């Protein structure tokens, strides 16, 4: 349908609106003039009725004069007729002299008898109008006095404005027609002006000839609003020309971007079924650009066979409008067979109603990202060092195995394996060799044996093995587990050669059987862990099956761990002191030991709660508390006058406490706060501390030695490689471990222990280091040590660990303990 021109549409709208407004004004004018004419006429009727009433108060003899007067009024005023009607409805006077004596009902068709009667009875004038007020009658009561008495009459004045109103109406209609003519003329003038000053300039703009748009001559439009439109059109022309230039430049840049973008891009014209691929698409598929198909097959033909059906189905749903987007990640196969992971983004850029006509597809190569994601998935499920499954992966496999074995009523098992004393290997050879050995162990555990399902590294030197399908008889399943466990132990124990050294490893194994009443992976894993921990406590290098008593002990161990902070704060833990004596039975020092009595468990051995504190990390806080208590006692003894021969009070320091970055400052702060003499404080460290980060250890020892603190090596001879660093360490004392002293017996001392003791004593003398023997319980052991050159002893032969009060009595009385 052709659209109307603005030069026609605007005048038509103006004419219609103006005509409606003029019609409204014409209607209101008619109502106003009509109402004014009626009101004016009625006022005149009422006025002249009163005057007429005055003339009618005459005797009958003057009736002729009255009729002449009424006739004159009718002639002079716009009255239709004036009649005097008696109460019997007979006309007494008639201004037209035609109906006198007749009944009013036969003469006037507009006579209203009800109003007449009302006027007679009430003696009040009444109006009766009709034909919208253009015709009407006024009833005026007239009371005359005659010789026979007074009588009531009604003066009836009728008027008819029809002729007068028709003249007024014609005059108003003529005025309206003139106004409508002026409106029509205005619309025609508006049409000419719009055609000249608006439509003609607008027609100068043609999209098809944008670069040839003429400059609009705005001067011919003057300076009004139309000129402003001209100026606007000129600006629009300039803007459109610029936009077209920019669009062409953008098209060139778009083509350049298509060819240089690192993503594969195609543009598909669905009308012609032609597809344009950019150069990167050909590079991505490793083919020459001319080898690409010119249709959508240039994409679909390279989709991986396993992904093709689902990918094309998703694309079809997008084409049909079922899917809002198409972002289905899939694989392409290059001409050389390489797998390319792509993330597509397809967009319809032109469509007819709901049918797409042109589409653009951007395919981002996410192969690197996908490999990174696969790596993350692998790392979240496998150990990076040994390439074995990790804990989370094992638990998933275990959960599935439990469900399967419950369904088929079979037994399975879980091994939890720990390499015995593996820390010593790290300390001796370094962590890189430790990782090499872990890989060796992993390969040996992976050796294919029946029933082995999954081998995993849990953490550090701990491994786990999931075994499945062990049969439906529990005893047979237990025998199979034990047999496999011993085979693994023998295989792991085989010699490993490292740096011209031979290493033989032992493993401790905890075993849990499943399924049972608690068929959860974490519960089976916990049971195997408890069995392993039990094995570490009672006997390493063995296989231990989980039993419920182990769980009770584990629960007790957990409770003890939870009780330790409360026991320390409530002083349930008490610092004891075990004296050291020389060969003259003089007390030369003491070791600070910790004792704990609990209302529920009684006396809890340090051999129980100290390892727990090490495991939980609470040993750091506990060690600081013990050191502060020992320094406080030293200060008290100093104030009392400590004996001259008392040289040192030793305090054990755990490796975790020693390797804290602020350890040196913490020790100095404690000594300063408690006010004791630092030269009386001796810190005992183990050989494991010495060989872990040797440079850092030497720095810390040197800083504290400069402050006055002494150091001793506890349990010397049981660790690794301390001899290599002994001459570099600023230490004061070596303590011969109790395990060597225990071998010194009357019936015959073991040659190995005797040689070790003699070597430690001789080495100490050569280095100028004091030596102390621990665990001296017999006089024979003391004499043996004294003969070898050891002059300081600690053990039950002299005294057990004593409460503070008893120890102070012994210290200040100077008596030999009995």
Image (cartoon, grey):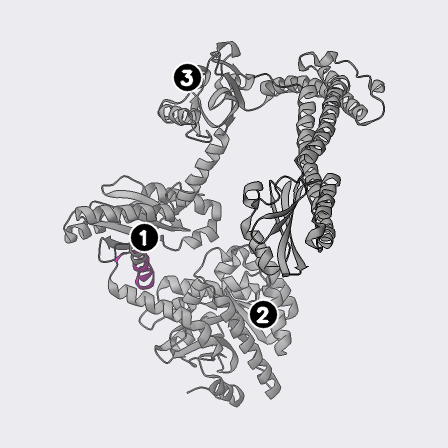
In the rendered image, the vertical position of residue 442 relative to residue 656, given as above or below:
above
The answer to whether marks 3 and 1 mark residues whose Cβ atoms lie closer than 8 Å is no
Q: Which residue is mark 2?
A: 710
Q: CA distance from mark 2 to mark 1?
A: 42 Å
From the viewer's perspective, is the residue at label 2 or at label 1 nearer?
1
Q: CA distance from mark 2 to mark 3?
A: 80 Å
Give the number of callouts.
3
N-terminal of the pair, mark 2 or mark 1, is 1
Per the image, the residue denoted by label 3 is: 301
Q: Position of residue 235 (x, y in %)?
A: 77, 23
Q: Residue at x 70, y 11 (%)?
A: 209
The picture quadrant where one finds residue 812 is bottom right
Give the CA distance from mark 3 to mark 1.
52 Å
Q: Nearer the viewer, mark 2 or mark 3?
A: 3
Front tag of 3 and 1: 3
**Which residues fall within the magenta stretch?**
528-545
Q: Residue at x 56, y 45 (%)?
A: 103
Residue position for label 1: 416
* Secondary element at tag 2: strand
**Residue 676 appears anywhere in the view:** no
Question: Magenta: predominant secondary structure element?
Answer: helix
Q: Residues within 10 Å of mark 2 (few under 14, many from 20)?
A: many
Please tell me which of labels 2 and 3 falls first in the chain. 3
């Amino acid at each position: 349908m052709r659209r109307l021109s603005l030069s026609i549409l605007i005048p038509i709208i103006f004419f219609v609106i103006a005509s409606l407004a003029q019609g409204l004004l014409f209607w209101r004018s008619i109502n106003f003039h009509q109402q004014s004419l009626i009101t004016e006429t009625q006022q005149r009727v009422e006025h002249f009725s009163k005057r007429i009433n005055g003339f009618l108060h005459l005797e009958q003899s003057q009736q002729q004069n009255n009729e002449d007067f009424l006739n004159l009024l009718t002639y002079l005023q716009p009255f239709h007729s004036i009649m005097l009607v008696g109460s019997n409805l007979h006309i007494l006077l008639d201004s037209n002299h035609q109906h006198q004596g007749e009944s009013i009902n036969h003469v006037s068709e507009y006579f209203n008898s009800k109003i007449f009667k009302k006027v007679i009875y009430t003696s009040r004038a009444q109006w009766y109008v009709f034909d919208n007020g253009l015709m009407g009658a006024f009833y005026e009561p007239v009371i005359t006095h005659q010789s026979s008495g007074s009588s009531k009459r009604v003066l009836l004045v009728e008027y008819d404005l029809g002729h007068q109103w028709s003249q007024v109406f014609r005059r108003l209609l003529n005025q309206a027609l003139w106004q409508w003519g002026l409106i029509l003329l205005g619309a025609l003038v508006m049409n000419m002006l719009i055609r000249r000053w608006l439509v003609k300039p607008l027609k100068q703009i043609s999209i098809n000839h944008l670069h040839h748009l003429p400059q609009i001559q705005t001067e011919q439009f003057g300076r009004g609003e139309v000129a402003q439109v001209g100026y606007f059109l000129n600006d629009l022309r300039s803007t459109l020309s610029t936009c077209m230039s920019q669009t062409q430049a953008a098209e060139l840049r778009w083509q350049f971007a298509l060819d240089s973008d690192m993503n594969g891009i195609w543009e598909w014209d669905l009308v012609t079924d032609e597809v344009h691929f950019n150069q990167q698409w050909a590079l991505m598929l490793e083919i020459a650009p001319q080898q690409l198909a010119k249709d959508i097959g240039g994409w679909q033909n390279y989709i991986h066979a396993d992904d093709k059906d689902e990918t094309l189905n998703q694309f079809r749903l997008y084409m049909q409008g079922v899917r809002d987007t198409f972002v289905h990640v899939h694989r392409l196969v290059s001409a050389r067979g390489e797998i390319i992971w792509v993330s597509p983004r397809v967009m319809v850029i032109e469509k007819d109603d709901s049918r797409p006509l042109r589409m653009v597809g951007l395919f981002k190569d996410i192969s690197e990202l996908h490999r990174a994601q696969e790596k993350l998935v692998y790392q979240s499920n496998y150990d990076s060092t040994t390439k074995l499954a990790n804990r989370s992966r094992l638990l998933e496999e275990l959960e599935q195995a439990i469900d399967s074995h419950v369904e088929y009523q079979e037994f399975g098992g879980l091994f939890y394996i720990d390499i015995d004393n593996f820390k010593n290997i790290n300390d001796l050879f370094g962590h890189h060799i430790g990782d090499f050995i872990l890989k060796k162990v992993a390969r040996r555990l992976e050796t294919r044996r029946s029933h082995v399902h999954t081998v995993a590294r849990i953490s550090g030197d701990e491994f786990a093995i999931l075994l499945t399908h062990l049969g439906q008889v529990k005893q047979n399943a237990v025998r199979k587990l034990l047999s496999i466990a011993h085979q693994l132990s023998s295989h792991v124990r085989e010699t490993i050669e490292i740096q011209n050294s031979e290493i033989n490893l032992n493993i401790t194994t905890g075993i849990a059987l499943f399924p049972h009443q608690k068929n959860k992976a974490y519960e089976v894993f916990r049971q195997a862990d408890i069995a392993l921990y039990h094995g570490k406590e009672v006997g390493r290098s063995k296989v231990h099956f989980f039993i419920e008593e182990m769980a009770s002990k584990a629960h007790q161990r957990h409770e003890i761990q939870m009780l330790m902070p409360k026991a320390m704060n409530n002083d349930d833990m008490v610092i004891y002191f075990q004296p050291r004596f020389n060969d003259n039975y003089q007390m030369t020092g003491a070791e600070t030991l910790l004792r704990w009595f609990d209302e529920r468990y009684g006396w809890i051995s340090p051999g129980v709660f100290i390892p727990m504190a090490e495991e939980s990390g609470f040993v750091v806080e506990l060690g600081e508390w013990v050191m502060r208590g020992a320094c406080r006692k030293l200060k008290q003894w100093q104030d009392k006058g400590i004996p001259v021969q008392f040289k040192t009070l030793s305090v054990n320091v755990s490796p975790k406490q020693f390797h804290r970055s602020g350890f040196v400052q913490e020790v100095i702060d404690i000594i300063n706060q408690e006010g004791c003499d630092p030269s009386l404080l001796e810190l005992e460290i183990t050989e494991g501390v010495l060989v872990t980060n040797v440079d850092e250890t030497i720095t810390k020892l040197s800083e504290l030695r400069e402050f006055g603190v002494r150091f001793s090596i506890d349990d010397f001879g049981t660790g690794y490689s301390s001899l290599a660093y002994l001459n570099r360490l600023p230490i004061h004392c070596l303590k011969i471990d109790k395990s060597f002293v225990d071998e010194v017996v009357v019936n015959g001392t073991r040659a190995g222990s005797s040689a070790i003791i003699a070597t430690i004593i001789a080495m100490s003398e050569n280095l100028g280091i004091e030596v102390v023997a621990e665990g001296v319980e017999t006089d024979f052991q003391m004499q043996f040590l004294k003969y070898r050159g050891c002059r300081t002893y600690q053990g039950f032969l002299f005294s057990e660990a004593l409460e503070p009060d008893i120890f102070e009595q012994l210290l200040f009385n100077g008596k030999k303990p009995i």
